[in-house]
Amino acid sequence: MSGMSTQTARRLGKIVGLRNGIIPDTPTTSDIVRDLRENYLARDRAALTAIRDPKYPGRHWIIRSWLHEYSVIRRTWKTKLKVSPLFQAEKTVNAALKYVDKSIQCQSGRPGGLTALTRDNLVAYFDELEGHCEAVTGIDQVSLASKILWLCFPNAAPMYDSFARTALNPSIKGTLSARSSSRKYEAFIRDWFELYDAYRLQTEAFALSAGVFPIRTFDWALMRASPIRN
Protein backbone atom coordinates (compact mmCIF):
# COMPACT_ATOMS: atom_id res chain seq x y z
CA MET A 1 0.00 0.00 0.00
CA SER A 2 1.43 3.36 -1.07
CA GLY A 3 3.54 4.82 1.70
CA MET A 4 1.58 3.18 4.51
CA SER A 5 3.48 2.06 7.57
CA THR A 6 3.50 -1.62 8.49
CA GLN A 7 2.58 -0.69 12.05
CA THR A 8 -0.51 1.22 10.93
CA ALA A 9 -1.65 -1.60 8.67
CA ARG A 10 -1.25 -4.09 11.54
CA ARG A 11 -3.13 -1.88 13.96
CA LEU A 12 -5.94 -1.36 11.50
CA GLY A 13 -5.96 -5.08 10.87
CA LYS A 14 -7.06 -5.62 14.45
CA ILE A 15 -9.46 -2.68 14.37
CA VAL A 16 -11.47 -4.23 11.55
CA GLY A 17 -11.37 -7.69 13.07
CA LEU A 18 -8.55 -9.33 11.13
CA ARG A 19 -6.32 -11.83 12.91
CA ASN A 20 -2.92 -11.18 11.37
CA GLY A 21 -0.25 -9.09 13.07
CA ILE A 22 -2.27 -8.08 16.10
CA ILE A 23 -0.66 -5.47 18.33
CA PRO A 24 -1.74 -5.57 22.00
CA ASP A 25 -3.68 -2.66 23.51
CA THR A 26 -5.03 -1.28 20.25
CA PRO A 27 -8.75 -0.50 19.89
CA THR A 28 -10.99 -3.19 18.46
CA THR A 29 -13.89 -2.61 16.08
CA SER A 30 -16.32 -2.83 19.00
CA ASP A 31 -14.32 -0.14 20.85
CA ILE A 32 -14.52 2.18 17.84
CA VAL A 33 -18.25 1.68 17.32
CA ARG A 34 -19.03 2.02 21.02
CA ASP A 35 -17.07 5.26 21.19
CA LEU A 36 -18.91 6.65 18.17
CA ARG A 37 -22.33 5.65 19.47
CA GLU A 38 -21.81 6.89 23.01
CA ASN A 39 -19.88 10.09 22.37
CA TYR A 40 -20.51 11.28 18.82
CA LEU A 41 -23.64 9.79 17.25
CA ALA A 42 -26.14 12.30 18.69
CA ARG A 43 -24.04 15.27 17.61
CA ASP A 44 -23.42 13.72 14.20
CA ARG A 45 -27.15 13.25 13.68
CA ALA A 46 -27.90 16.82 14.70
CA ALA A 47 -25.33 18.21 12.25
CA LEU A 48 -26.45 15.84 9.47
CA THR A 49 -30.03 17.02 9.92
CA ALA A 50 -29.15 20.69 10.14
CA ILE A 51 -27.01 20.83 6.99
CA ARG A 52 -29.88 19.43 4.90
CA ASP A 53 -32.33 22.19 5.85
CA PRO A 54 -31.33 25.87 5.46
CA LYS A 55 -34.24 26.83 7.72
CA TYR A 56 -33.46 24.33 10.47
CA PRO A 57 -33.60 26.04 13.91
CA GLY A 58 -30.11 26.74 15.24
CA ARG A 59 -28.53 25.37 12.08
CA HIS A 60 -25.46 27.61 12.07
CA TRP A 61 -24.74 27.04 15.76
CA ILE A 62 -25.17 23.24 15.48
CA ILE A 63 -22.73 22.94 12.60
CA ARG A 64 -20.26 25.38 14.10
CA SER A 65 -20.30 23.45 17.38
CA TRP A 66 -19.83 20.15 15.53
CA LEU A 67 -16.82 21.54 13.65
CA HIS A 68 -15.43 22.94 16.89
CA GLU A 69 -15.21 19.38 18.26
CA TYR A 70 -12.50 18.73 15.65
CA SER A 71 -10.62 21.98 16.39
CA VAL A 72 -11.49 23.08 12.85
CA ILE A 73 -13.00 26.39 13.92
CA ARG A 74 -10.45 27.36 16.55
CA ARG A 75 -7.80 28.68 14.17
CA THR A 76 -9.19 29.22 10.70
CA TRP A 77 -7.90 32.63 9.67
CA LYS A 78 -4.50 34.22 9.20
CA THR A 79 -3.29 35.41 12.59
CA LYS A 80 -2.50 38.89 11.27
CA LEU A 81 -6.20 39.61 10.82
CA LYS A 82 -7.50 41.67 13.74
CA VAL A 83 -10.82 39.92 14.21
CA SER A 84 -12.34 38.02 17.10
CA PRO A 85 -12.48 34.20 17.15
CA LEU A 86 -16.28 34.38 17.13
CA PHE A 87 -16.25 36.54 14.01
CA GLN A 88 -13.81 34.15 12.36
CA ALA A 89 -16.05 31.19 13.14
CA GLU A 90 -19.17 32.96 11.90
CA LYS A 91 -17.61 33.95 8.60
CA THR A 92 -16.01 30.55 8.03
CA VAL A 93 -19.19 28.56 8.62
CA ASN A 94 -21.26 31.06 6.64
CA ALA A 95 -18.94 30.63 3.66
CA ALA A 96 -19.23 26.84 3.82
CA LEU A 97 -23.02 26.82 4.20
CA LYS A 98 -23.48 29.36 1.42
CA TYR A 99 -21.69 27.02 -0.96
CA VAL A 100 -23.58 23.96 0.28
CA ASP A 101 -26.97 25.63 -0.13
CA LYS A 102 -26.15 26.88 -3.60
CA SER A 103 -24.17 24.03 -5.11
CA ILE A 104 -24.63 20.72 -3.27
CA GLN A 105 -27.63 18.44 -3.08
CA CYS A 106 -26.90 16.50 0.08
CA GLN A 107 -27.47 12.77 -0.17
CA SER A 108 -28.76 10.22 2.31
CA GLY A 109 -28.13 11.05 5.96
CA ARG A 110 -28.68 7.45 7.06
CA PRO A 111 -25.97 4.79 7.45
CA GLY A 112 -25.88 2.64 4.33
CA GLY A 113 -27.98 5.07 2.28
CA LEU A 114 -27.40 5.25 -1.46
CA THR A 115 -24.94 7.77 -2.85
CA ALA A 116 -24.20 8.79 -6.41
CA LEU A 117 -20.94 10.44 -5.40
CA THR A 118 -17.85 9.02 -7.11
CA ARG A 119 -14.25 9.47 -6.06
CA ASP A 120 -13.65 11.70 -9.07
CA ASN A 121 -16.48 14.13 -8.40
CA LEU A 122 -15.68 13.99 -4.68
CA VAL A 123 -12.42 15.81 -5.45
CA ALA A 124 -14.27 18.26 -7.71
CA TYR A 125 -16.76 19.10 -4.94
CA PHE A 126 -13.89 19.45 -2.50
CA ASP A 127 -11.97 21.82 -4.78
CA GLU A 128 -14.93 24.17 -5.14
CA LEU A 129 -15.94 24.13 -1.47
CA GLU A 130 -12.40 24.50 -0.14
CA GLY A 131 -11.63 27.27 -2.62
CA HIS A 132 -14.78 29.14 -1.60
CA CYS A 133 -13.85 28.96 2.10
CA GLU A 134 -10.17 29.76 1.50
CA ALA A 135 -11.11 32.89 -0.46
CA VAL A 136 -12.97 34.17 2.61
CA THR A 137 -10.49 33.17 5.32
CA GLY A 138 -7.12 33.55 3.60
CA ILE A 139 -5.73 30.10 4.50
CA ASP A 140 -6.34 26.58 3.29
CA GLN A 141 -9.46 24.92 4.61
CA VAL A 142 -8.74 21.28 3.78
CA SER A 143 -9.93 19.91 7.11
CA LEU A 144 -13.07 22.04 7.31
CA ALA A 145 -14.08 21.39 3.69
CA SER A 146 -13.66 17.63 4.06
CA LYS A 147 -15.83 17.59 7.19
CA ILE A 148 -18.57 19.65 5.55
CA LEU A 149 -18.46 17.20 2.62
CA TRP A 150 -18.89 14.29 5.03
CA LEU A 151 -22.03 15.94 6.40
CA CYS A 152 -23.33 16.21 2.83
CA PHE A 153 -22.17 12.74 1.73
CA PRO A 154 -21.75 10.66 4.92
CA ASN A 155 -21.68 7.37 3.02
CA ALA A 156 -18.99 8.49 0.60
CA ALA A 157 -16.67 11.31 1.77
CA PRO A 158 -13.76 10.65 4.16
CA MET A 159 -12.78 13.37 6.63
CA TYR A 160 -9.29 14.78 6.24
CA ASP A 161 -7.66 14.85 9.65
CA SER A 162 -4.05 15.14 10.82
CA PHE A 163 -4.37 11.98 12.93
CA ALA A 164 -5.85 9.97 10.06
CA ARG A 165 -3.27 11.39 7.64
CA THR A 166 -0.32 10.31 9.77
CA ALA A 167 -1.90 6.92 10.40
CA LEU A 168 -1.91 6.35 6.65
CA ASN A 169 1.63 7.64 6.22
CA PRO A 170 3.69 8.87 9.21
CA SER A 171 6.37 10.31 6.89
CA ILE A 172 3.92 12.54 5.03
CA LYS A 173 4.06 15.44 7.49
CA GLY A 174 7.04 17.07 5.89
CA THR A 175 5.75 16.84 2.32
CA LEU A 176 2.16 18.02 2.61
CA SER A 177 2.86 21.66 3.37
CA ALA A 178 4.14 22.29 -0.15
CA ARG A 179 1.09 20.76 -1.82
CA SER A 180 -1.99 22.65 -2.90
CA SER A 181 -5.18 22.04 -0.92
CA SER A 182 -6.55 19.94 -3.77
CA ARG A 183 -3.44 17.78 -3.92
CA LYS A 184 -3.49 17.25 -0.14
CA TYR A 185 -7.03 15.91 -0.20
CA GLU A 186 -6.59 13.93 -3.39
CA ALA A 187 -3.48 12.20 -2.02
CA PHE A 188 -5.21 11.57 1.29
CA ILE A 189 -8.32 9.92 -0.16
CA ARG A 190 -6.22 7.84 -2.55
CA ASP A 191 -4.42 6.22 0.38
CA TRP A 192 -7.59 6.21 2.49
CA PHE A 193 -9.64 4.29 -0.07
CA GLU A 194 -6.77 1.92 -0.84
CA LEU A 195 -6.88 0.72 2.76
CA TYR A 196 -10.66 0.99 3.13
CA ASP A 197 -11.28 -1.11 0.03
CA ALA A 198 -9.16 -3.90 1.48
CA TYR A 199 -11.31 -3.98 4.63
CA ARG A 200 -14.60 -2.69 3.23
CA LEU A 201 -16.74 -5.78 3.79
CA GLN A 202 -15.69 -6.23 7.42
CA THR A 203 -16.05 -2.54 8.21
CA GLU A 204 -19.44 -2.12 6.55
CA ALA A 205 -20.90 -5.25 8.09
CA PHE A 206 -19.88 -4.28 11.60
CA ALA A 207 -20.75 -0.58 11.33
CA LEU A 208 -24.15 -1.03 9.71
CA SER A 209 -25.17 -3.71 12.20
CA ALA A 210 -24.45 -1.15 14.94
CA GLY A 211 -26.25 1.70 13.17
CA VAL A 212 -23.20 3.86 12.44
CA PHE A 213 -21.64 5.03 9.18
CA PRO A 214 -18.90 2.79 7.74
CA ILE A 215 -16.99 5.83 6.45
CA ARG A 216 -17.16 7.48 9.87
CA THR A 217 -16.13 4.23 11.58
CA PHE A 218 -13.06 3.84 9.41
CA ASP A 219 -12.15 7.51 9.79
CA TRP A 220 -12.30 7.13 13.56
CA ALA A 221 -10.29 3.91 13.40
CA LEU A 222 -7.55 5.74 11.51
CA MET A 223 -7.57 8.58 14.01
CA ARG A 224 -7.27 6.13 16.87
CA ALA A 225 -4.43 4.27 15.12
CA SER A 226 -2.35 7.39 14.45
CA PRO A 227 1.22 7.28 15.79
CA ILE A 228 0.91 10.93 16.93
CA ARG A 229 -2.15 10.05 19.02
CA ASN A 230 -0.78 6.94 20.72
Image: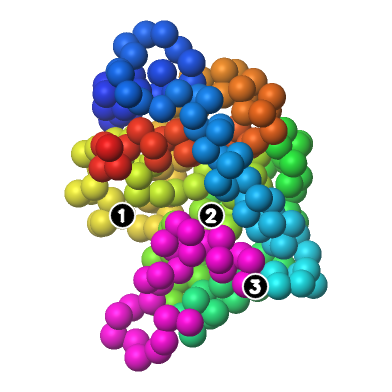
**Circle on res. 179:** 1
Question: Can you give x and y, in whole percent of width and height, for residue 175 in the image?
Answer: 23, 48
Query: What kind of element bears circle 1?
Result: loop
User: Could you give the CA–CA distance between mark 2 and mark 3, rounded to whole angstroms?
Assistant: 15 Å
Sequence-wise first label, 2 or 3: 3
Image disc number at residue 60: 3
Label 1 to label 2, Cα distance in Å?
A: 19 Å
Image quadrant of residue 26? Answer: top left
Q: Could you tell me which quadrant the C terminus lies in?
A: top left
Residue linked to disc 2:
147
Q: Quadrant of the N terminus?
A: top left
User: Which one is earlier in the sequence, the residue at label 1 or at label 2?
Assistant: 2
Q: Residue at x 61, y 22 (%)?
A: 206
Are the two marked residues, 2 and 3, in contact with CB atoms closer than 8 angstroms?
no
The answer to whether residue 70 is visible is yes
**Amino acid identity at mark 1:** Arg
62 part of magenta stretch: yes
Query: In percent of the image, x 50 and y 47: which residue is there?
Result: 159
Read off the magenta span: 60-86
Q: Amino acid at mark 3?
A: His
